[in-house]
C-alpha cells in the first residue's frame, strides 16, 4: 500500500515539474515572439557612410603598426583571467571559513 502511494506521489511530482517546465518554456517563447514583433516594427538603421580612400589607407597603416584587434584580445584575456581569479579566491575563502 505504501509503495502504491509513493508511486502516485512520484507521478504527481513529475507532472507538476513537467507543467512548470512547459509553462516557463511557453513564457520564453512568448517573450521571444514579442521581441521579434517589436524588432520588426523598428525602423531600419541607415548604413554608415564610406570613408575616403586616403583615410582608409592611413587607418590600415595605423592598424599595422598598432594592432588594435590583438590588444583587444589581450585585454579580454586579462579581464577573464582576473575575473576567474576573483571567483576562485572567493571560493577558497569560503572553504577556509567552513573548515
Image (spheres, rainbow, N blue to C red):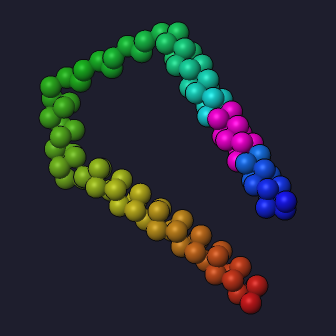
Residue 59 in percent (x, y) is at 22, 38
Q: Residue at x 85, y 60 (%)?
A: 1
Residue 24 visible, this angle: no
Q: Residue at x 15, y 25 (%)?
A: 53
Magenta highlight on residue 61:
no
Q: Residue at x 61, y 23 (%)?
A: 30
Q: Residue 44 or 7: which is nearer the viewer?
A: 7
Residue 21 in percent (x, y) is at 66, 40
Against 81, is 28 above or below?
above
Residue 50 visible, this angle: yes
Q: Main secondary structure of the magenta part?
A: helix
Q: Residue 31 or 15: which is nearer the viewer?
A: 15
Against 71, is 89 above or below?
below
Among all residues in the image, which is located at the extreme bottom?
A: 99
Against 48, is 25 above or below?
below
Residue 52 in percent (x, y) is at 19, 23
Quadrant assignment for the C terminus: bottom right
Magenta highlight on residue 17:
yes
- Relative to 9, 69 lies left or right: left
Against 68, is 81 above or below?
below
> What residue range appears in magenta?
14-24
Q: Residue at x 63, y 29 (%)?
A: 26
- Relative to 13, 86 lies left or right: left
Amino acid at each position: 500500500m505504501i509503495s502504491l502511494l509513493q508511486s502516485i506521489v512520484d507521478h504527481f511530482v513529475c507532472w507538476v515539474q513537467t507543467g512548470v517546465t512547459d509553462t516557463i518554456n511557453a513564457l520564453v517563447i512568448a517573450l521571444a515572439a514579442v521581441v521579434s514583433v517589436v524588432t520588426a516594427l523598428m525602423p531600419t538603421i541607415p548604413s554608415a557612410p564610406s570613408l575616403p580612400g586616403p583615410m582608409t589607407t592611413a587607418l590600415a597603416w595605423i592598424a599595422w603598426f598598432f594592432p588594435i584587434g590583438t590588444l583587444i584580445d589581450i585585454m579580454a584575456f586579462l579581464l577573464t583571467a582576473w575575473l576567474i581569479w576573483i571567483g576562485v579566491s572567493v571560493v577558497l575563502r569560503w572553504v577556509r571559513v567552513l573548515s
